Amino acid sequence: DQIMAGDTSVINLLPSHTQLFLTHLAWSDMVPKEQRVPFSPLITTEEYTKYWKTARENTSSGPSSLHFGVFKAGSQRSRIAELEACMTSIQLATGYPPRRWQTCIDAMLRDSKK
């Protein structure tokens, strides 16, 4: 909140490249104060369910044995969706991701049409 308000005094102990990045997170004067919406890492059950309704089941979900279909199916059950939304919110709010979120592979594929 302090950084978004333009107060960068809280970042003085961080590495210079991190400081530079964080200073750019402040609201621009071009955005009127009444239009500034505070960031919330909270994911509601409704948002969680809405996302999984549109997620493509054939999307790779990573090295775990959990398939996207597991999450898609779970999002249709209110208690499971509520738990998953809560767990995701905690991880986003604290900045402490589970170990399985820390492994990923980036790949670029050539467009076969060219």
Image (cartoon, grey):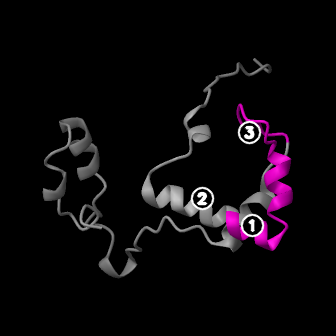
Classify the position of the C terminus by image quarter. Answer: top right
Report which residue position mark 3 lands on.
61
Q: Nearer the viewer, residue 70 or 55?
A: 70
Q: Mark 2 = which residue?
A: 88
| Percent x, y of residue 42 | 53, 68
Of labels 3 and 1, earlier in sequence is: 3
The mark that comes first in sequence, 1 or 2, is 1
Residue 26 vs residue 81, the one in the foreground? 81
| Residue 79 coordinates in the image, percent (x, y) | 77, 72
In the picture, the quarter occupied by the N terminus is bottom left
Mark nearest the camera among 3 and 2 is: 2
Q: In x, y percent, where is residue 52?
A: 77, 58
Inspect the image, locate mark 1, and give the three-letter code of the amino acid beneath it: Ala
Q: Mark 3–mark 2 contact, CB under 8 Å?
A: no
- Pick whichever of labels 3 and 2 is earlier in the sequence: 3
Name the image quarter holding residue 18.
Answer: top left
Residue at 73 percent across and 35 percent down: it is: 64
Please rate how many residues cluster around mark 3, counting C-alpha atoms within 10 Å: few if below 14, some from 14 to 19, many from 20: some
Q: CA distance from mark 3 to mark 1?
A: 17 Å
Q: Are marks 1 and 2 in contact (CB under 8 Å)?
A: no
Name the element at disc 1: helix
- Residue marked by disc 1: 81
* Magenta range: 58-83
In the picture as drawn, the residue positioned furthest to the bottom comes out as: 34
Label 3 to label 2: alpha-carbon separation: 15 Å
Q: Amino acid type of disc 3?
A: Ser
**Residue 3 vs residue 61: left or right?**
left
